[in-house]
Image: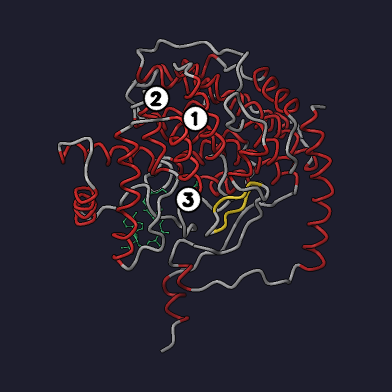
């Protein structure tokens, strides 16, 4: 058995027993009370699922197995310029252990070994108009691999429940291994006349993805390592993760569940916001007729966007109440690697201007930037200006978290997810006369 799989099994099986006993002996412990405002308000804050791989603190931001982003950058094995390798984060999320450089190397090699994409994926993608939104191509590309699902095949053969996690592990590893090739294929067919680039198995996961996209710039490789690490997981309640969790709880295989989650990520209030942010910034630059807008000009444009009844993309969050540490990590990256970018300076000016304006509306719970407020400007800097592709990059990264969590869910025997709904009549009946 692979070392990673063995380590996971050693951790997961005792935890399964422990949680079963907790549920049996202490199942009546109250973990939450639900208010009407939560039922009518998108279920914000209701504790209702187990998610091992990360947890979000409203003020401090994401913790992967307890580690903040600066700690992850410090502790995980890194690429040549010091940015963390997302392979290490996957290992950590699955095993709750910081891997050694050698273990990460083995995982990179394992993913290269599993990375062959079946021809039908390319044939399916090639049958679609090249201007189909890249996120649509992405989910269809993932679905075109579903016929390879180890879980579905073994389930049909009578897989016992105790082995579900093993088959889900196999599918998840294969899927993560194949995603860069599928995602890069979509980019090259949509934007580079279908001139595809073969993988380079001497590279780590992120550098190989960057290579297949068309860049061997060492700074861009570093950006990809950071990007794929920080977007990987944001606890279980975000729309894409929750979708994957819900769908996989029906024992749909990881291909079905992941593509469902990607359809959630493709919404403008979620992952598509990275496309919307950069579009909005370029529209502002066009409309103002300058690449170096002043804070006053930005403030006027923000007001105009709000007056049109639109949201300011990249700002606000359902859980966070402080600037997103993923925004800060990207800012630090730009400070370290990039000198003199009008676009990035504009992103930082927007950071100074937007929060007080949103605060003044009196209804926005979090006026601060989220992860999407910065990512596009970095990508444009390195020559990737095809905005509609940005959410695919987010999706490749999100696979790490949601698929690691999916392996945990099956190992821990999580049942079909099925919360209760109510009608407006029921709501009326609860109200005082
Ligand atoms: N610009 C303008 N209005 C906003 C913004 C914003 N950035 N954020 C929240 N509001 C409004 C929101 O539309 C709501 O208005 P109304 O009552 O008139 O419907 C009000 O403020 C209260 O919303 P909140 O409770 O603060 O936010 P909620 O938890 O409902 O939504 C987001 C969170 C992220 C959907 C929301 O902040 C938003 O639409 N932001 C812009 C889109 C975005 O950046 N999404 C990316 C999130 C991160 N990700 O990658 O997924
Ligand atoms: C995410 O990374 O999933 C977003 O920040 C949205 C969320 O956490 O709700």
Q: Quadrant of the C terminus?
A: bottom left
- Is 269 situated above or below 135? below
Residue at image location 43% in from the left, 49% down from the top:
370
Q: Which residue is mark 1?
A: 223
User: Residue 330 appears at what percent x and percent y?
Assistant: 46, 39
Q: Which type of secondary structure does the marked residue at label 3 adopt?
A: loop
Report how far apart the C-alphas of labels 3 and 2 lie in the structure.
23 Å
Task: Tell me whether circle 1 and circle 2 mark residues in contact (CB < 8 Å).
Answer: yes
User: Residue 76 appears at what percent x and percent y?
Assistant: 67, 35
The residue carrying mark 3 has its beta carbon less than 8 Å from ligand 2 = yes
The residue carrying mark 2 has its beta carbon less than 8 Å from ligand 1 = no
Q: Earlier in the sequence, mark 3 or mark 2?
A: 3
Other residues around mark 1 within 10 Å, as few (<14) / some (14–19) / many (≥20): many
Image quadrant of residue 341?
top left
Instruction: Give the label on residue 159, or none.
Output: none
User: Residue 160 appears at what percent x and percent y?
Assistant: 79, 39
Task: Tell me whether circle 3 and circle 2 mark residues in contact (CB < 8 Å).
Answer: no
Q: Which residue is mark 3?
A: 324
Other residues around mark 2 within 10 Å, as few (<14) / some (14–19) / many (≥20): some
Q: Earlier in the sequence, mark 1 or mark 3?
A: 1
Instruction: Give the label on residue 382, or none.
Output: 2
User: Residue 68 appears at what percent x and percent y?
Assistant: 61, 48
Image quadrant of residue 344?
top left
Q: Which type of secondary structure does the marked residue at label 2 adopt?
A: loop
Other residues around mark 3 within 10 Å, as few (<14) / some (14–19) / many (≥20): many
| Horizontal relation, residue 252 to residue 95: left or right | left
Q: Earlier in the sequence, mark 1 or mark 2?
A: 1
Residue at image location 41% in from the left, 21% down from the top:
187
Report the image quarter containing ligand 1: bottom left
Q: Quadrant of the N terminus?
A: top right
């Amino acid at each position: 058995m692979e070392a990673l799989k063995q380590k996971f099994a050693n951790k997961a099986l005792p935890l399964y027993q422990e949680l079963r006993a907790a549920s049996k002996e202490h199942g009546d412990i109250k973990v939450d009370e639900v208010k009407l405002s939560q039922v009518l308000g998108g279920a914000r804050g209701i504790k209702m699922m187990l998610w091992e791989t990360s947890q979000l603190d409203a003020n401090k931001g994401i913790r992967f197995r307890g580690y903040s982003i600066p700690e992850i950058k410090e502790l995980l094995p890194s690429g040549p310029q010091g940015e963390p390798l997302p392979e290490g984060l996957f290992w950590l999320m699955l095993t709750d252990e910081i891997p050694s450089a050698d273990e990460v190397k083995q995982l990179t090699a394992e993913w290269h070994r599993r990375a062959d994409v079946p021809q039908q994926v390319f044939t399916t993608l090639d049958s679609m108009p090249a201007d189909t939104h890249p996120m649509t191509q992405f989910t269809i590309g993932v679905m075109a691999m579903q016929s390879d699902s180890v879980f579905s095949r073994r389930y049909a053969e009578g897989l016992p429940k105790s082995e579900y996690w093993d088959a889900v592990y196999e599918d998840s590893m294969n899927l993560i291994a194949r995603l860069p090739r599928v995602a890069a294929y979509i980019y090259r067919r949509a934007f580079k006349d279908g001139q595809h680039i073969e993988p380079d198995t001497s590279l780590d996961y992120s550098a190989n993805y960057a290579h297949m996209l068309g860049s061997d710039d060492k700074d861009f490789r570093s950006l990809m390592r950071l990007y794929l690490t920080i977007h990987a997981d944001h606890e279980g309640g975000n729309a894409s993760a929750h979708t994957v969790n819900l769908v996989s709880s029906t024992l749909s295989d990881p291909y079905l569940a992941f593509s469902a989650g990607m359809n959630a990520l493709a919404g403008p209030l979620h992952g598509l916001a990275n496309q919307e942010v950069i579009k909005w910034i370029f529209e502002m630059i066009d409309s103002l007729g300058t690449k170096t807008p002043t804070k006053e000009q930005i403030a006027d444009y923000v007001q105009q966007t709000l007056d049109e009844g639109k949201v300011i993309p990249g700002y606000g969050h359902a859980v966070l109440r402080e600037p997103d540490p993923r925004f800060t990590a990207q800012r630090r990256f730009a400070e370290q690697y990039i000198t003199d970018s009008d676009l990035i300076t504009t992103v930082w000016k927007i950071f100074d201007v937007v929060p007080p304006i949103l605060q003044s509306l009196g209804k926005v719970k979090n006026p601060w930037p989220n992860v999407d407020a910065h990512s596009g400007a970095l990508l444009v800097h390195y020559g990737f200006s095809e905005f509609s592709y940005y959410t695919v990059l987010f999706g490749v990264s999100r696979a790490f978290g949601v698929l690691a969590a999916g392996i945990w869910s099956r190992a821990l025997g999580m049942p079909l997810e099925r919360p209760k709904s109510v009608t407006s009549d029921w709501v009326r009946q609860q109200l005082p006369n």
